[in-house]
Each structure stands twice: as C-alpha cells, then as structure tokens.
C-alpha cells in the first residue's frame, strides 16, 4: 500500500518507484532541512539555479563563484563547500530542474521531481518537533549536487502537491526563457521580470504603431 507521501508524489504502488527505493536502502541522515510553504528558499534557489543558463544565447554564469554565493546564503550554512568537480553535476541538475518548470501536467512534474530525488538519494520524512508535523529531507549523498537536488526537489514537490503546475512559469518574451514561480492571484504572470514585461510592451507598441 502506498503511503500518503507516496500518493502526494504521484507514486504507483505497482512500480519500482522512489517510495520502494527509499524504504529498502539504509537510511543515513546527513542534513535536515525544514520546508514550510512554497515561497521558501528551495524554490528561490531552484529559480536562480536554472536561470544561470541563458538557453537563448548559451551564456552560462554557473561557476565556482556563483555556486559559492548560493551556498553562502544563511539558510545554506550546513551545506558542503563547492569544488571544481561539483560544476558538471550541478549543471546536470540544473537541466533536470528546468524540465520540472517546463512540465505541462502534474504527472509529468511528479515524474521529473521523483527522478531528481532518487538521483540525490534523498530521504524525505515527517518531523514532529516544533509547532507541529512538517516535512524534512535528508540527502544521503555528501556532495553539493546531491544536497542541492534533495533540497530543490522537495521544495518543487511541495509546490506541485499544493498548487499543481500552474505556478511554474517560463518567460514568454521573444528573447528570454528564464523560469519563475508565479505568485500572482490569478496565475496570469507571463514574464520572469519587470524588465521583460516592459520590453515586450515596447515591442507590442511599436508593432501596433507600424500598422497605423
């Protein structure tokens, strides 16, 4: 029988899934991170990580300096320090996270999130200390990409469970495909930033003016 967590993550009890995987491996807790709601640090980190690559022109700003800045955030004080060897797996993780933002259905998003969790050897569990039951995650892999994968995927999973895929956004500007979390009331956001919104407004105005 699949647990509530398994159902929330879209896990089929008949398949060899992440749920079964997590219950057959030896649990080795290395980190504990609290997730309270979908605007927390994990989602901001997911957005920032994906947007280090401009898929339109190929500009990649994910280097050791940028990775160090991610890890220097106060919430990341328990994370391992980054070394050169971390960059390749972090770029691979970046692509997997982008694919979550691009998911068209909840099932697609769940499958992609589950893959990230499994690759990171993430151990999700319910903590009962503090104000009440809440989700934690413990990445079993002791490297930056494994730790990031566990953290980001759990944040993404919470968003999908609570709000579906409507809150994931990819910028619709002609020259931008950066991702964002749509926190507008009616899920109407189309651009990653005010800059893109303003540029698209100018383009639309010029197109209309040219027809006059």
Image (cartoon, helix red, strand yellow):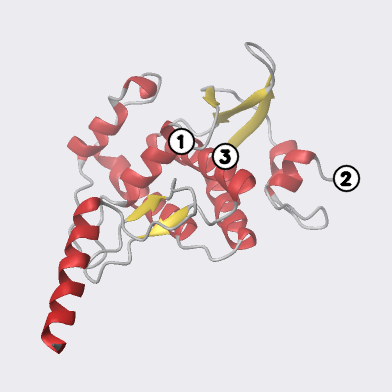
Label located before the other in sequence (2 or 3): 2
- In the rendered view, tell whether residue 180 sits above or below residue 80: below
Q: Judge depth for marks 3 and 1 and give the one in front.
A: 1
Instruction: Give the structural element (helix, strand or loop) at label 1.
Output: loop
Which quarter shows the C terminus?
A: bottom left
Could you say which disc has been placed on residue 70 in the image? none
Name the residue nearer the viewer: 10 or 117. 10
Q: Are marks 3 and 1 in contact (CB under 8 Å)?
A: no
Identified at 64% across, 61% down, the residue is: 107
Q: Judge depth for marks 1 and 2 and give the one in front.
A: 1
The residue that label 1 is drawn on is 39
Identified at 61% across, 57% down, the residue is: 111
Residue lying farthest to the bottom in this orientation: 211
Q: Position of residue 42 (x, y in %)?
A: 44, 36
Q: Position of residue 163 (x, y in %)?
A: 59, 48
Q: Judge depth for marks 2 and 3 and give the one in front.
A: 2
Distance CA(mark 1)–CA(mark 2): 32 Å
Distance CA(mark 2)–CA(mark 3): 22 Å
């Amino acid at each position: 029988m699949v647990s509530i967590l398994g159902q929330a993550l879209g896990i089929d009890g008949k398949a060899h899934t992440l749920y079964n995987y997590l219950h057959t491996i030896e649990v080795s807790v290395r980190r504990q991170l609290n997730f309270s709601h979908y605007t927390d640090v994990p989602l901001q980190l997911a957005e920032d990580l994906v947007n280090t690559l401009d898929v339109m022109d190929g500009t990649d700003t994910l280097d050791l300096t940028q990775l160090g800045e991610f890890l220097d955030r106060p919430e990341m004080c328990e994370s391992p320090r980054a070394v050169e060897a971390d960059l390749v797996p972090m770029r691979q993780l970046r692509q997997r996270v982008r694919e979550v933002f691009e998911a068209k259905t909840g099932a697609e998003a769940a499958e992609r999130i589950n893959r990230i969790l499994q690759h990171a050897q993430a151990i999700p569990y319910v903590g009962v200390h503090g104000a009440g039951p809440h989700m934690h995650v413990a990445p079993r892999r002791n490297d930056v990409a494994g730790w990031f994968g566990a953290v980001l995927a759990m944040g993404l999973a919470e968003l999908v469970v609570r709000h579906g895929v409507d809150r994931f956004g990819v910028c619709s500007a002609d020259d931008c495909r950066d991702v964002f979390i749509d926190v507008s009331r009616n899920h109407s956001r189309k651009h990653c930033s005010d800059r893109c919104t303003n540029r698209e407004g100018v383009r639309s105005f010029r197109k209309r003016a040219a027809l006059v």
